[in-house]
Amino acid sequence: MAVQAVERADSAAASSGPAVASSGSTVASFGPAVALSCRECGERVPLGPVFACASCFGPLEVAYELPLGDPEGLRRRIESGPADIWRYAPLLPVPADVASRPNLRPGFTRLVRADNLARELGVTGELHVKDDSGNPTHSFKDRVVAVAVEAARAFGFTTLSCSSTGNLAGAVGAAAARAGLRSCVFIPHDLEAGKVVMAAVYGGDLVGIEGTYDDVNRFCSELIGDPLGEGWGFVNVNLRPYYGEGSKTLAYEICEQLGWRLPDQLVIPIASGSQLTKIDKGLKELIALGLVEDRPYRIFGAQAEGCSPVSRAFKDGQDVVRPVKPDTIAKSLAIGNPADGPYVLDIARRTGGAVEDVTDPEIVDAIRLLARTEGIFAETAGGVTVGVTRKLLEAGELDPSLTTVVLNTGDGLKTLDAVAAGPSATIRPSLDAFREAGLG
Ligand SMILES: *Cc1c(COP(=O)(O)O)cnc(C)c1O
Ligand SMILES: [Zn+2]
């Protein structure tokens, strides 16, 4: 089966036009990836800059011939690899020498054992925070962009682009700068100052669009179909199948950092839903590869109430996600029409998880709670996951006696305005003044 897939991808790639130089170099460029396959109908097409199935318009995803059969050897190879996502290159659509190319080398961020937070929340099992604020541009987006950049190179794109809720624009700007590519990224015009500066500082073009993220995304889809967008790789549109794979590294790292163990429960934020679906894909791969024990895990999705179309559908027992107009401080998650929403619903239901949402005040409380208990300053998306964790524990949906991993996907420095915090007192530089302030 897998061998046949390689042959099909090979022969088809040879005749798929100038973007793919030759079948041999394409296969080498994408490591263990052998084809793109349709999530809906399963049809396979050669690896290329395409994202929708020609037969049914379903989303395409990367299919692999994974290195099965020698789990011990694979584990040793991973453990002796670099301390970034490229230690997992044997499981990603990237060339084997990817670590030696100019890129930002994100990943292998810390997994924090959060005993103080656990005590506060009444968790008796292990509680961990996977803290992706430690990536080069301070969000999880560096993972997905790093993989997309390799695809952009392989397809000969010269401009790197994206539609972004903020963090992605910064990650693309930085990655393009390092890779020597031009960048031009698109954001809603009303983002947080921290994200606008981060998106602009790397020297590429940044365009604010008067509208929501969903308007930005629609605009980018039009640009791809226009001669204006020729030679442009949109990391989350025409390179989306490759981009998505970068999120698998979160699953790999969490399990490796737990000592090659699956967590029982994961709480993951949802914007488009890509990250959540690919973490599930990564966990399934680790099981198939024999790197972790084959046992159940439960996936929980987290949204802000002001943009909770997936949570709503989950609670209503629906299979379709009805789009909403976002209104929340969690701007990085403010996608009203999430592309992977239906797949998120499938995964939450299949694994025995749930999708839940929290209000803006609950998000702020949760940011403060995580900062106060563990010394981790999360952006609003981290407030969403911690807040949802608290809510699901109170509702009895998360089991407090099990091993739970909560994702913090971004840095609080990018969403400073969400948290009104300041000095306890401002005083003259004298002991008397300090005594009067009552803080001694
Ligand atoms: C983009 C983003 C996510 C998740 O995005 P998906 O589209 O669901 O993959 C989560 N957290 C932060 C901080 C983000 O920027
Ligand atoms: Zn299809």
Image (cartoon, rainbow, N blue to C red):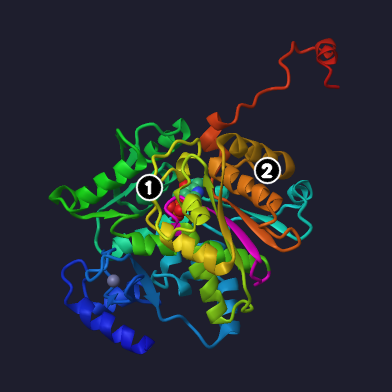
- In the figure, 417 relative to 108: above or below? above
Point 49% across, 58% down: residue:
317
Quadrant assignment for the N terminus = bottom left
Residue type at numbered disc 1: Pro
* Side (left or right) of 208 relative to 253: left
Q: Main secondary structure of the magenta part?
A: loop
Q: Earlier in the sequence, mark 1 or mark 2?
A: 1
- x then y, percent, for residue 412: 57, 38
- x then y, percent, for residue 26: 28, 74
- x then y, percent, for residue 104: 45, 54
Q: How would you rate the neighbour count of disc 2 (Cα within 10 Å): few for under 14, some for 14-19, many for 20 or more?
A: many
* Side (left or right) of 186 relative to 122: left
Q: Which residue is mark 2?
A: 370
Point 56% across, 73% down: residue:
78
Residue type at numbered disc 2: Leu
Highlighted range, magenta? 259-274
Point 66% across, 66% down: residue:
264
Q: Ligand 2 lies in which image quarter?
A: bottom left
Residue labelled 1 has its Cβ within 8 Å of some atom of ligand 1 = no
Check if residue 389 falls in the magenta segment.
no
Q: Which residue is mark 1?
A: 323
One can see residue 247 in this view: no
**Quarter residue 173 falls in:** top left
Q: How would you rate the neighbour count of disc 1 (Cα within 10 Å): few for under 14, some for 14-19, many for 20 or more?
A: some
- In the figure, 335 relative to 298: above or below? above
